[in-house]
Image (cartoon, rainbow, N blue to C red):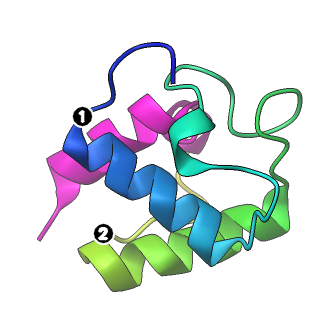
Amino acid sequence: MGETASAAELELARLIVESLNLEDVAAEDIELEAPLFGDGLGLDSIDALELSLAISTRYGVQLRSDDPDNARTFASLRSLARYIEQHRS
């Protein structure tokens, strides 16, 4: 991570690596502002479903597939961590 990640961002990065079995990725190497999908981390829609379930289980935050803000929510590690912090139960 180029910038220093917060504890919440690093915890989320570890959850992404663990829940998606990203064997070639270290949590510390996920860039805070890099895209999670496509050219960035390379996640796909199946990964989004698995990640949503893991986030729901770990943080109690529901991510709905029909939410119009999903593109912004899942834009980067930082944006996803921010969303979780704002919606934690």
Residue 18 location, quadrant: bottom right
First along the sequence among labels 2 and 1: 1
- Crowding at dot 1, Cα within 10 Å, few <14 / some 14-19 / many 20+, comes out as few
Q: Which residue is mark 1?
A: 6
Q: Is residue 50 something that shows in the picture?
A: yes
Left or right: residue 36 compared with residue 82:
right
Residue 76: x %, y % from top left: 56, 31
Measured in 3D between alpha carbons, the distance from the residue under mark 2 to the one under mark 1, in whole angstroms, is: 19 Å
- Magenta span of residues: 69-89
Q: Is residue 73 magenta?
A: yes
Residue 25: x %, y % from top left: 73, 50
Q: Amino acid at mark 1?
A: Ser
Q: Which residue is mark 2?
A: 61
Q: Residue at x 54, y 70 (%)?
A: 52
Q: Residue at x 34, y 56 (%)?
A: 11
Assign the C terminus to one quadrant of the image: bottom left
Q: Give SS at disc 2.
A: loop
